[in-house]
Image: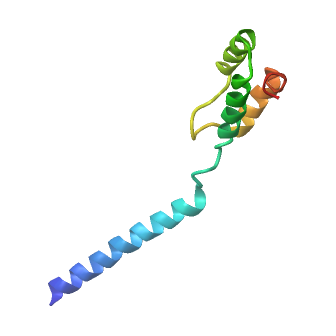
Amino acid sequence: MKNKLVRFILSISIILIIAVAFLMGRFTAHFDDNLCYSNLLKQITLKLKHSNTKEIYLLQEKLQTLPLHGYESDCDEIHNAFLKNNFYSLVS
């Protein structure tokens, strides 16, 4: 009887710990935070469809300067690099 009670309490404790950890993660970090680079890549792709060879080369050079790190990218940092390198004149 005592052994069953210990197992039950241990099981409930594990479930509660997992639930609390899940909820903390769910509400403190969202997966779609800092996914602004998706819009950037869409704009660049559209531009490449209607570009000549010289424009593609210029765009390629500028792309290498962008601080893209996947989901760890900082949208403000990307935006500042966009402004600094005058990307808007190439992609718009």
Residue 87 located left or right of residue 17: right
Left or right: residue 8 compared with residue 74: left
Give the image quarter of residue 44: top right
Estimate the x, y position of residue 7 in percent, counting from the top left: 22, 79
Eyeballing the image, is 57 above or below 38? above
72 is higher (above) or lower (below) than 23: above
Farthest residue, direction bottom: 1
* Residue positioned 70% across, 39% down in the render: 39
The image shows residue 37 at horizontal and vertical percentages of 66, 37
**Which residue is rendered at x = 57% and y = 52% of the image?**
31
Query: Quadrant of the rendered structure where residue 69 is?
Result: top right
The outermost residue toward the top is 54
Query: Relative to the observer, which residue lies in front, 16 or 85?
Result: 85
Q: Nearer the viewer, residue 23 or 71?
A: 71
List x then y, in percent, for residue 24. Answer: 53, 63
Across and down, in percent, residue 66 comes to: 67, 25
The residue at the point 82 percent across, 29 percent down is 92
In the image, is residue 46 above or below residue 16?
above
Q: Report the number of discs.
A: 0
Q: According to the image, what is the colour scheme of the structure?
A: rainbow
Can you tell which quarter of the image residue 3 is in?
Answer: bottom left
Rendered residue at 40%/67% (across/down): 18
Image vertical order of residue 19 relative to residue 79, above or below:
below
Question: Is 4 situated left or right of 57 in this image?
Answer: left
Which quadrant is home to the N terminus?
A: bottom left
As rendered, which of 69 and 5 lies closer to the eye? 69
